[in-house]
Image (cartoon, rainbow, N blue to C red):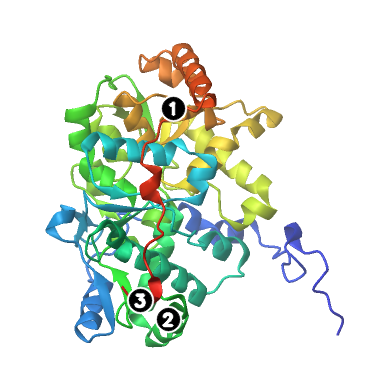
C-alpha cells in the first residue's frame, strides 16, 4: 500500500478528506445542524437532564476536588438557564480571563468591559499570568486532546483561585470571568469531562502536580463557568439607569448568538422571560433592550457566523460566503439594521473582517459588527476611539456613531491629539500595570 499522507485531498485538508458526492438533499440534511434552534420551543425540557454541578458537590464532599465557590463578597445574582436551573453570576471581585482574539483583533472589546467595571468601582484583577485556552488549536487543527485542554483549564482556574494572595487576600478572593465564547464553551465541556471521569482527573493531576498547580494535592474547579455577557446581562439595568447618556430609541439592533455560548452545553446558557419571551438565550439582546434600542429579528438568527475554526483556515471562501449570504445580507435586507451585536470573539471577527469580500461578487452589503459591551459603552459616553476602539473594525461604524449623536470627526481628531500625548510618554491606563504582574506566589508551595 502506498503512503498517500502527503497527497492533496478536498480543500487542501489531506488525502484522508475525500468528496462525499452527496446529493442536494443529503447535503442539506448533513449540514442542518448549522441552523439548529436551541431554545425552549425546540428542546424537550420534559425530562430533566443531569446537572453536572450536583456531581461536582459530591466530589468535593469526597475530598476529590476543591470547588472555587462564589461567596457573598462576589455579590452573585441568580439567573435562569435553559432548563430553569439557577446559575449564580458574580458582580464583584473578578479575575479576568481575557481572549487572545479580542486582544489581537478587537481590543475595544476587553477595554469596554474594564471601563464599565471602573465606572462601577468594582474590584478586579487584570493580571498577566494567564494562558490561551488552546481551544483554537483543538477545534482548528485536531492536534489537541482532552488531557491538554483539561490541564490548561485547571491551570488557569488554579491561578484565578490563588491570585488574591499576592494582594493579601485568601484563596478564592477573585472569581474568573471568561471573556471569550470559545473559551467559555470549551471550559464548560472540559468541566463535565473532569467531573465525570476519574481517569481524566488522575491524568491531569500528574501534570498539574509538576506545575505546582494543585491545592492540598487537589485540582480546583470553579462553581460556575461565567461569561462576561452574563455579567453584562445582570448589570444591564444598572448600566441603563446609572450610566446611559445617549437615547438609543432610533437605533435598530440585531443580535448574533454565538454557537459556543448557547449550543455547547446548552443547559448552562442564560434565558430570561423578559427577553424574547424567554425562548432564545437572553445575553446580548437583553443589553440592547435595556438601552432602549429597537431589537429587530431576522430569519437566520440561529445560524452560525460561518467561522467554524478549521475552514476559516483552509476553506476561507466558504466562511466568507456563509457570513455574507446567511448573516450580513439577511440582516441588512430583512432587518435594515444599524448594527449587529455579538458576544464572541470569533463571531465578531468573522462578520466584521470579511464584508469587503462581498464587493468582488457585487454583494455590496455592510453593517457594523460590535460586541454588546461596546455598544453599551458607546451609549454610556465611552470614547469611540480610546475605549471602544472602533478604528480596529473593518466594518463601517461612522454612520452608527453619527446616528447616535456622536461626532465621528471630532472623536477622531481628539484621538489623534491623544496619540501625540502618548508619543510624549503621557500614557493613560485602565488598570494599574504594576498590579497586573504576578511575581510573588510560589506555586510549588501549594497555596
Residue on which the image places disc 1: 386
270 up-or-down from 322: above or below: below
In what element is the residue under mark 3?
Answer: helix
**In the orientation shown, which residue stands out farthest toward the right?**
2
> Which callout, 2 or 3, points to the residue nearer the camera?
3
Name the side, left or right, on which 175 lies relative to 10.
Answer: left
48 up-or-down from 181: above or below: below
Q: Which quadrant does the N terminus fall into?
A: bottom right
Q: Position of residue 43 (x, y in %)?
A: 31, 61
Mark with earlier residue (2, 3): 2
Residue at left offset 28%, top offset 84%: 64
Assess disc 3: are there few (<14), some (14-19) or many (≥20) residues with their C-alpha within 10 Å of its C-alpha: few
213 up-or-down from 164: above or below: below
Residue at left offset 48%, top offset 12%: 409
Residue 326, visible in the rendered structure: no
Name the side, left or right, on which 18 lies relative to 268.
Answer: right
Assess disc 1: are there few (<14), some (14-19) or many (≥20) residues with their C-alpha within 10 Å of its C-alpha: many
Q: Position of residue 435 (x, y in %)?
A: 36, 49
Q: Position of residue 162 (x, y in %)?
A: 31, 65
Q: Which quadrant does the C terminus fall into?
A: bottom left
* Residue contact between numbered discs 2 and 1, judged by CB atoms under 8 Å: no
Residue on which the image places disc 3: 445
In what element is the residue under mark 1?
Answer: loop
> Which callout, 2 or 1, points to the residue nearer the camera?
2
Per the model, the C-alpha gap separating discs 2 and 1 is 42 Å
Mark with earlier residue (1, 3): 1
Q: Position of residue 349 (x, y in %)?
A: 53, 42
Residue on which the image places disc 2: 209
Amino acid at each position: 500500500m502506498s503512503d498517500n499522507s502527503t497527497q492533496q485531498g478536498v480543500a487542501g485538508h489531506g488525502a484522508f478528506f475525500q468528496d462525499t458526492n452527496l446529493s442536494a438533499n443529503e447535503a442539506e440534511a448533513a449540514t442542518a445542524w448549522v441552523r439548529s434552534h436551541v431554545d425552549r420551543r425546540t428542546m424537550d425540557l420534559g425530562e430533566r437532564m443531569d446537572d453536572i454541578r450536583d456531581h461536582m458537590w459530591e466530589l468535593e464532599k469526597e475530598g476529590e476536588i476543591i470547588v472555587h465557590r462564589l461567596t457573598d463578597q462576589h455579590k452573585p445574582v441568580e439567573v435562569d438557564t435553559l432548563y430553569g436551573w439557577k446559575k449564580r453570576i458574580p458582580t464583584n471581585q473578578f479575575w479576568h480571563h481575557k481572549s487572545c482574539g479580542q486582544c489581537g483583533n478587537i481590543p475595544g472589546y476587553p477595554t469596554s468591559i474594564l471601563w464599565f467595571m471602573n465606572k462601577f468601582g468594582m474590584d478586579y484583577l487584570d493580571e498577566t499570568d494567564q494562558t490561551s485556552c488552546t481551544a483554537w488549536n483543538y477545534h482548528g487543527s485536531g492536534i489537541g486532546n482532552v488531557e491538554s485542554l483539561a490541564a490548561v483549564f485547571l491551570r488557569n482556574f488554579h491561578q484565578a483561585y490563588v491570585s488574591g494572595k499576592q494582594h493579601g487576600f485568601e484563596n478564592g478572593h477573585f472569581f474568573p470571568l471568561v471573556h471569550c465564547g470559545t473559551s467559555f464553551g470549551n471550559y464548560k465541556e472540559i468541566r463535565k469531562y473532569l467531573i465525570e471521569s476519574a481517569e481524566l482527573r488522575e491524568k491531569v493531576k500528574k501534570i498539574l502536580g509538576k506545575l505546582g498547580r494543585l491545592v492540598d494535592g487537589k485540582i480546583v474547579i470553579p462553581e460556575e463557568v461565567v461569561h462576561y455577557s452574563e455579567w453584562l446581562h445582570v448589570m444591564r439595568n444598572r448600566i441603563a439607569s446609572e450610566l446611559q447618556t445617549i437615547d438609543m430609541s432610533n437605533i435598530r439592533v440585531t443580535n448574533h448568538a454565538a454557537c459556543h455560548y448557547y449550543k455547547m452545553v446548552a443547559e448552562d446558557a442564560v434565558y430570561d422571560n423578559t427577553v424574547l419571551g424567554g425562548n432564545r438565550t437572553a445575553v446580548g439582546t437583553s443589553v440592547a433592550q435595556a438601552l432602549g434600542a429597537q431589537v429587530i429579528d431576522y430569519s437566520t438568527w440561529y445560524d452560525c457566523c460561518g467561522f467554524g475554526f478549521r475552514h476559516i483556515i483552509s476553506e476561507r471562501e466558504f466562511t466568507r460566503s456563509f457570513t455574507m449570504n446567511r448573516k450580513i445580507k439577511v440582516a441588512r435586507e430583512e432587518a435594515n439594521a444599524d448594527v449587529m451585536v455579538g458576544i464572541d470573539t470569533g463571531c465578531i471577527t468573522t462578520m466584521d473582517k470579511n464584508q469587503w469580500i462581498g464587493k468582488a461578487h457585487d454583494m455590496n452589503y455592510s453593517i457594523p459588527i460590535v460586541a454588546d459591551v461596546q455598544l453599551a459603552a458607546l451609549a454610556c459616553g465611552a470614547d469611540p476611539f480610546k475605549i471602544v476602539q472602533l478604528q480596529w473594525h473593518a466594518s463601517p461604524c461612522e454612520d452608527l456613531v453619527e446616528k447616535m449623536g456622536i461626532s465621528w470627526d471630532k472623536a477622531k481628531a481628539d484621538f489623534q491629539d491623544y496619540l501625540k500625548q502618548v508619543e510624549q510618554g503621557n500614557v493613560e491606563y485602565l488598570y494599574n500595570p504594576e498590579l497586573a504582574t504576578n511575581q510573588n506566589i510560589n506555586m510549588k508551595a501549594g497555596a
